[in-house]
Amino acid sequence: MLNLQHRIDLLVQLGAFILANPPEWQEAKARAHAANAWFIPEFIELASNTIATQFLSRPVLEAIATEYSVPDLPANPKTVGIVMAGNIPLVGFHDWLCVYLAGHNARVKLSSRDTILLSFLITKLNEWDPACKGTTEFAELLKGCDAYIATGSDNSGRYFEYYFNKYPHIIRRNRTSVAILDGSEIKEELDLLADDTHLYFGLGCRNVTKLYVPKDYSFEPILESMRKYGYFFDHSKYKNNYDYQLALHLLNNQYYMTNGSVLLSENQALYSPISQLNYEFYLEKTAVEQQLENNQGVQCVVGHGHTAFGQAQCPGWKDYADGIDTMTFLVTL
């Protein structure tokens, strides 16, 4: 078995490997892009480098291990089944990382949309230390596990609850993020908000898919800031989505605004389709904040007094999905 210090050393080595970007890692990332057109090189790079810097530095790992009183060697290591999503590159890495750091064994069902990146990184750990080979396995069926962490849609969440309800579990469902604007935002903040809405094509649960704006808000500056993602229009899958949503607005005679590559549509829904950003006017900002406070569909709120502009897709270790403390769940199994 790997003791805590050995596990941390290997994770630090993994972070250094990602940042060093050797040819074999470049080749794995290229294969991931070829397998999933939504995983463009820019976003694979962003996801992997964020993991390396935010999660795999020695000070962060040692601080987490101390805070959660992670044992050197678990007295009774468990096998934890992990059902991973595949909406953005390596989106399930943090769940695996928590299981590994806690000293448990992971049995992972990868999303069909993201089969290459994590499996490659685990292979590297196994190469560096053969003792790692028993700590992570990949499987299509997650039978015989002691606990489960599963991420999916609201529909699959009900399926997970049915099958995993007699085991300790964390079940994650659909979530998205929103921004509350007050009209005082400067250009630099709007430029950063464009990142919150556009990174990963808006497919992540931490992507802003809806804006709350004061009455008579002027949208021209924000549309201008979003022009830096105009190159999305060269991406065939994105362009197909844009053309489809634009056609719906035209057919339904529905008002919209656009800068040529993203549609702004007045809509009460939190979730917006790819290439579209919903907005809603408000009279009282505090009323909107109260409305969102206990909304189970909201992962993150961006704006003054909330998550800073440009930080929605830069989560720290303890910015747990759905607000569920994964490390506490694992160290108390």
Image (spheres, rainbow, N blue to C red):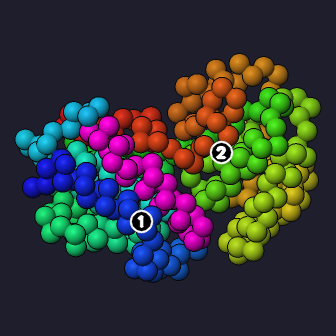
**In the rendered image, the vertical position of residue 286 relative to residue 165, given as above or below:** above
Q: On the image, numbered disc 1 is attached to which residue? A: 18
Q: Amino acid at mark 1?
A: Ile
Q: Which callout, 1 or 2, points to the residue nearer the camera?
A: 1
Work out whether residue 156 can be spotted.
Answer: no
Residue that appears at 59% across and 56% down: 203
What is the secondary structure assignment of the residue under circle 2? Answer: loop
Q: Position of residue 35 (x, y in %)?
A: 50, 78
Q: Give the dominant element type of the magenta stretch: helix, strand or loop.
A: helix
**In the rendered image, the vertical position of residue 31 relative to residue 45, given as above or below:** below
Q: Position of residue 238 (x, y in %)?
A: 70, 68
- Residue 316 vs residue 238, the one in the foreground: 316
Give residue 214's quadrant in the image: top right
Circle on res. 294: none
**In the rendered image, the vertical position of residue 217 relative to residue 99, given as above or below:** above
- Residue 307 vs residue 278, the one in the foreground: 307
Residue that appears at 67% across and 40% down: 309
Residue that appears at 42% across and 37% down: 318
- Residue 267 vs residue 253, the one in the foreground: 267
Q: Amino acid at mark 2?
A: Gly
**Horizontal relation, residue 328 to residue 248: left or right:** left
Residue that appears at 28% across and 71% down: 123
**Horizontal relation, residue 98 to residue 223: left or right:** left
Q: Position of residue 136 (x, y in %)?
A: 22, 61
Work out whether residue 210 can be spotted.
Answer: yes
**Horizontal relation, residue 297 to residue 86: left or right:** right
Position of the C terminus by quadrant: top left
How far separated are the C-alphas under marks 1 and 2? 23 Å
Q: On the image, numbered disc 2 is attached to which residue? A: 310
Position of the N terminus by quadrant: bottom left
- Which badge, 1 or 2, is on the more N-terminal residue? 1
Magenta stretch?
Answer: 39-65
